[in-house]
Image (cartoon, grey):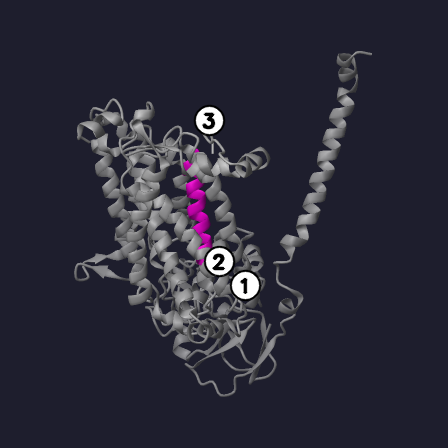
Amino acid sequence: MSGPSTYAPNSGFTRWMDARLPVLRLMHDTVITFPTPRNLNIWYTFGGILTFCLGVQLVTGITLAMHYTPHTEMAFNSVEHIMRDVNYGWLLRYVHANGGSMFFLAVYIHMFRGLYYGSYKEPREMIWILGVMLYILMMATAFLGYTLPWGQMSFWAATVITSLFGAIPFIGEGIMNWLWGGFGVDNPTLQRFFSLHYLLPFVISGVVILHIWALHVPGNNNPLGIDVKGPQDTLPFHPYYTVKDLFYLSLFVILFALFVFYAPNYLGHTINYIEANPLVTPPHIVPEWYFLPFYAILRAIPDKLMGVVALFGSLLTLFFVPWLDRSKVRSARFRPTYKILFWVFVADCFVLGYAGSQPVDGTIAGGAISLLWVARLATAYYFIHFWVLMPFTHRWETPRPIPDSIAKPVLSGAS
Amino acid sequence: MTVAQSQTADSSRRDFLYIATSAAGAVGATMAAWPLVAQMNPAANVLALASIEVDISTIEPGQLITVTWRGKPTFIRRLTADEVAAADAVSLDDLLDDNARNGNLDDNAEATGTNRLAAAGDGATEWLVVVGVCTHLGCIPAFDQGNYGGWLCACHGSEYDSVGRVRVGPAPDNLTVPPFEFLSDTRVRIG
């Protein structure tokens, strides 16, 4: 997408086309000759996997929309109609529902990869920022889509999440009525959620193009976190990385298929197979697994407004990461202290996820420890990691010696 | 007149034209966007929801019924004499929210037991009418749970007492008492 082009059209048609709409040149430079660091590992294949996930969600979503009815009286039954009557409807719905989980699994690995190898650092700040925007758009899309089957969990998830805006002083209630189109989640809400759930994936597609564009200006970071010094450090994207991406995509699709065909409801909640009832809240409502850490942060704070501020703050914090990390060394391979902090942070996210999955008055260790306090400590650590540890770690950390070039350790067999 | 001269002579006039055009464009775009935003507000049929009338003749002291008002569950409960006395005995200092949140009273009314309840005709002040929506994030609290003789919201753990006052957070406010009036000893109109 940027840099000098080596494309040479070799037929009459491609020469004619190249002078009018150089789209073949764009494709050639982007996915064929693009110089890519030669040492990218498995964790760098998730960009391709995520593109695949977006495509799967678009295709299955558009086909599901041909059979779904966004109306409170008919939505639940139309989903059962898809499951029982529509040809391969069960397959489309299970792929779409599990596809959401697989999409988040891939995006979390992709994000932790970026945090580990310092991929957000200068000159790649815009790639990271666009990535955080994509992540938030994904969360919005997943939330809107989860409402559509109009089961009990759908309805109460929609109620709780839209009620977050009620915490805003003075205008909160007005915003809620505007979001709902009424005095609670009802048919106007369902219809607009369907409209927006159909829209946002196309917004995501647009931002993905910007994300890849921003990536192709400085080029890929790599596990060593050092700059490409010359042609000896890179390989053309095709065939080296097209094949590598395809190989790991195949493994990913196997995992995907295991869920779709052998455990299609494992990641869901059985209570969502009960039609929405605005008069009864289920005793234990929880979001899908990919929102659990943020749900734990929301519940950890005993004040309504501050809980909501903490929830949104935990997401907005990610935008500042390129400037919070002050170390000049990118890769955690050469940062002994940051490497430990990274893994503690990963563990912290799992602790938050577990706390978010349990009832609000849950305990661990035989009732000795209140999960609420575990969630509070883990929430505090989440913010401390970004706002205290990240900006100051480099002051007492001695980085390990950094290789001279990408080619040297690769060719000598050392990492 | 040279090119340089003409640019100097016209520049202030051009600046004015740029600003005027941009301002007109911005105002026009805002006006065009307004209907697209406002269409999401509650529609006329939603706003036109009528009030409801409920027969309360069969409710004994201690009983609770749930009715639907504006699409939301609304609790109507007749308290026992002991519960009324206990609710009155609670000091305002022990409450998280000392405002009555009662649509039939002054905005500054205190959350005493009496201010949360109402009397039907000449009967005792023993009727509680509240919107059954947790003031935290909108779940429906369950009755006869929690430690305050009232409701527990399972979503995030808020607890309310026998007259719907919040006693344990994260909910910030007492359950809302909607505008209502007793049409007779046995009928109440909500809304």
Three-letter residue code for mark 1? Thr
**Closer to us: B183 or A2:** A2
Circle 2 or circle 1, nearest the eye:
1
Circle 1 or circle 3, nearest the eye:
3
User: Circle 1 — which element?
Assistant: helix
Q: Chain of mark 1?
A: A
**What residue would you read off at disc 3?**
A4
Quarter of the image with the N terminus of chain B is top right
Write down the region rendered in magenta: A126-144
Q: Kindly indicate whether the residues beneath marks 2 and 1 are on one polypeptide chain.
A: yes
Q: Is residue A142 magenta?
A: yes
Q: Is residue A105 above or below residue A209?
A: below
Q: Are marks 2 and 1 in contact (CB under 8 Å)?
A: yes
Three-letter residue code for mark 2? Thr
How many discs appear? 3
Residue A128 location (% of width, % of height) = 40, 37
The quarter of the displayed image where residue A414 is located: top left
**What residue would you read off at disc 1?**
A189
Q: Give the residue at x 36% y 74%.
A: B144
**Closer to us: A166 or A356:** A356
